[in-house]
Image (cartoon, rainbow, N blue to C red):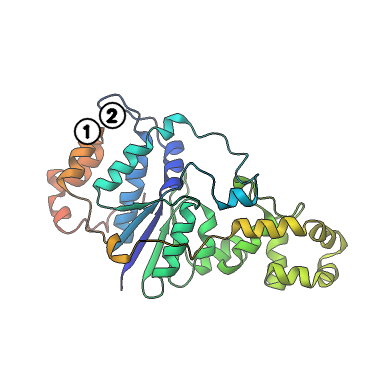
Amino acid sequence: MSKLLLVDGSALLHRAYHAYPPLKSKTGEIVGAVYGVTSILISALQEVKPSHVMVAWDLPKPTFRHKKYVGYKAQRPKADMEMVEQIPMVKKVIETMGIVQLAEEGYEADDIIGTLSKLESQENEVVILTGDQDTMQLVSDHVRVLTPAKGANPPVLYGPDEVFNKYGVHPEQIVDYKALLGDPSDNIPGVAGVGPKGASNLLKMFGTLERIYRDIKEVQVHFGEILAKKLADGRDSAMLSQDLSKIVIDMPLNLNLEEMEYKGFATEQVKNIFEELGFRSLVKRFFGEENKEQKNKNLDTNQMGLF
């Protein structure tokens, strides 16, 4: 059985840019986000120990979701140029590590990850590395989501039970949960006046968004006239939000498992690029004399924490 690590590169970049200081390379370039992404990715590689890896990226172009809803992500400020300027170097480091990267026009990184997670999870184990909560809808017995540490909060590996404990709904209900609740980060409207607890309770009783609206009179009986009216008034918004929240799991991709095989990153080329960028701590950590034995054992990291 293979273990596939699917990485949302865009989500990690945003996380790293805001979490790490603006470090500079020997030539004066800002490389804080490059260091952050590299460090997070390496720690995940060590923890997950995948046999195959792929990093997916968003493109700075509209997707099919923007065509459906002009307001999709419209509230987001323009990306800082300091972050954007680090993207080529982030991708160069990942390429030097021998990891396949992919972006598809008209789609988001989540869609690439969703498609590959469903394609490969039938016979393999899949771990998705991201800070984006949208991917919780992909969680199953074979697919888990790994979120990086944030501040004092440690990394978390989400399976079906962890998703339910956090949101009060099962992974297959996450799309309908977001349809009701909305998502300010993506400017997905949801139903005005419905909060997390209300969305969770509705789905616990009715199971799906479609059944909630089919049995709206039952909603009124169990939850009251006010909530039933909010749902009725927000029906179109809920259906649009459901459509926008759903990750594509069947997009056409010209990539197979063999092409994503991972053979380890501890090469001379990686050491050289780390030295060029001034990542002395990473050079010492993975290429120093004291780590030769660890390196020869394929970087066994039982004594190291994640991220």
The Cα–Cα distance between marks 2 and 1, rounded to whole angstroms, is 7 Å
Residue occupying image coordinates x 38% and y 30%? 22
Residue occupying image coordinates x 61% and y 49%? 67
Count the numbered circles shown: 2
Is 214 left or right of 268, judged from the image as shown? Answer: right
Q: Are marks 2 and 1 in contact (CB under 8 Å)?
A: yes
Locate the N terminus by quadrant: bottom left
- Is 2 located above or below residue 187 in the figure? below
Which residue is tagged 1? 276
Which residue is tagged 2? 25
The kind of residue tagged 1 is: Glu
Picture coordinates of residue 282, whole percent (x, y)? 25, 41
State the SS at label 1.
Answer: helix
299 and 302: which is toward the camera? 299
Picture coordinates of residue 65, whole percent (x, y)? 59, 52
Picture coordinates of residue 127, whole percent (x, y)? 40, 62
Is 62 left or right of 43, judged from the image as shown? Answer: right
The kind of residue tagged 2 is: Ser
